[in-house]
Image: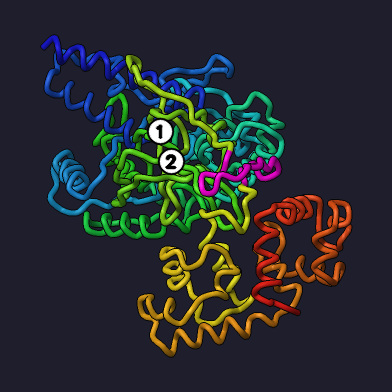
Amino acid sequence: MESVQKTITYLKTLLRNYQYQYYVINEPGIPDVEYDRLMETLRQLEIENPNLLTQDSPTQCVGGSSISSIFKPVHHKIPMLSLDTVSDESSYLVFHQRLKKRLNISKGITLCCELKLDGLAVSLLYINGRLVRASTRGDGLVGEDITANVRTISIVPEYLTGNKIPDYLEVRGEVFMSHAGFKKINQTAYREGHKIFSNPRNAASGSLRNLDPCITAKRPLTFICYGLGFFKGRSMPRSHIACLQYFKAWGLPVNDNTRLCYSSGEVIKFYHNAEMKRPFFGFDIDGVVIKVDDLELQKKIGSSSRAPRWAVAFKFAAQEAITKLNNVEFRVGRTGVITPVAQLSPIRIAGVLISRATLHNVHEINRLGLKIGNNVVIRRAGDVIPQIISVAKPDVDSNIIVKNITIPKQCPGCGSKIRFISGELALRCTGGLSCAAQRKSVIRHFTSRKALNINGMGKAIINQLVDKGYINNPADLFMLTIDQLISLERVGQKSAQNIIDALIISKKTTFARFIYALGISKIGLVAAENLASHFVTLNFLLAADLNALSSVYGIGQTAASYLKEFLDDANNREVIRMLVVEVGIYW
């Protein structure tokens, strides 16, 4: 019993800490699925040991029990409760049967199904049709007055319009941010050197609880109604979905993806349909909410101190999880950009085993404060490449050993000097045509249709030629023999001869195509044509200084810098010499 009591005390402390991070400072320490797992573990222990259940347990309280002292408190006339959750069909069916048992009926129950938006719960109070107050959920009993900030949300009406509006009307809903809006504010924050938000929910919460409404006004927040609070002065419908329709008629925004379902099968079908459409809504949802539609039945079923018994959140499979960062590998791309890739302890997210995640650039490592050994939050949404969105806050008694990530000073592929491109926050290898890590991609680009257009020289053949050591740079292509080509998989005598013929034909090209074929960063086909027209000969191009290069139409300072660095590299110059002198490419 002492061991169980220690575990319960530990879980309570841990969950209260995570609640503070999530609701008060808007910096979640763990994914929702991990929070739900810890909460369910505590709940089960309390069920098995009822003598250890206390009223201040997180299982008995609404999430945001810690209220900031920054905003004026607002006392809710009707508590704003949280929702219990289910995560699979069988646990939903248990909830459905429990409803019938509580109502003592065997027939079907009319249920209202709607999307579970991932934002911040808000209460709007209208008196005589005018918005007079807006508040957060807080601890369910007391929230925070955020009226000035909510007034800046254009979709929230200052005045309601239409008929039969109660004199006193409290509407409850969710403030959130669309994917497009989230991308926009992070781009702005990045340009201005401000904090980058990790997800739309954090962005919405941080914006709504900002002390300066002028800042909130610049954030692309939106709002959707999801329920009725306290009202008086006029009657309201006895149906939840009918109340939503009234709200819409009065000018309040409601979500059109709301349906009445008359059986558990229909509810499950709605759930899977929403899950399928999830990537296309344009905003984050993490499940669907199922409510008894009849408001009188809701009262009859009642609520616990934490959540209504007549509603449940049916959550989707987790798109986030926690795992360990074991290492960071630096990979070289075709243009020499060196990208950090996280090596993770394998973990399954939404049915897919994840062992790697992109880190984009060195700035991302610094922004996240990553260290080898950290537990990190991984997000995988749809078909998007998994990414690290934050470092998981360590447990209160954690002793994680971490070490700094070493940023390479030389290219991991060829040992050439690395250049930091501040405008792109990227590391770039200066090795160019001689970089082994770029070899396959450089040759593929050289042979591509817009470059030298060498027919028959596809990706599979180039990979084999490089792997066998037959070619190390573009000039080696022209030294290939029939015997070497027919030694490759799926290359016969005729195919080999066709490739040799294509190589001979490709020697006659244009100066612009030749420049483009070299694969110089920032030098596309149009830029190559401008350079060819300006310098006319290769010797003039090779002799040009930075000022001469940047004076060419369409060639900016950045492109001129890349070009100059490429042409100054001794290895690159040698390959160019081989192509022109030994191979005999001409224009």
Q: Position of residue 134 (x, y in %)?
A: 57, 30
| Image position of 551 (left or right of 362) | right
Question: Is disc 2 in contact with disc 1, using a CB cutoff of under 8 Å?
Answer: yes
> Dot 1, how many residues are within 10 Å of its Cα: few (below 14), some (14-19), or many (20+)?
many
Viewer-nearest residue: 246 or 139: 139
Under circle 2, the secondary element is strand
Residue 233 visible in rendering: no
In the image, is residue 81 above or below residue 89? above
Residue type of the residue flagged with mark 1: Val
The disc label shown at residue 403, or none: none
> Dot 2, how many residues are within 10 Å of its Cα: few (below 14), some (14-19), or many (20+)?
many
Distance between the alpha carbons at the discs numbered 2 and 1: 10 Å
Q: Main secondary structure of the magenta part?
A: loop
Query: Does the magenta segment cover residue 519?
Result: no
The disc label shown at residue 376, or none: 1
Q: Earlier in the sequence, mark 2 or mark 1?
A: 2
Residue 386 visible in rendering: yes
Query: Does the magenta segment cover residue 412?
Result: yes
The part of the chain drawn in magenta is: 410-428
Viewer-nearest residue: 308 or 230: 308
Residue type of the residue flagged with mark 2: Ala
Which residue is labeled 2 in the image?
342
Q: Position of residue 231 (x, y in %)?
A: 47, 34
Q: Position of residue 432 (x, y in %)?
A: 63, 55
| Image position of 572 (left or right of 412) | right
Q: Residue furthest bottom?
A: 494
Q: Residue at x 69, y 82 (%)?
A: 508
Single out the mark in the foreground, 2 or 1: 2
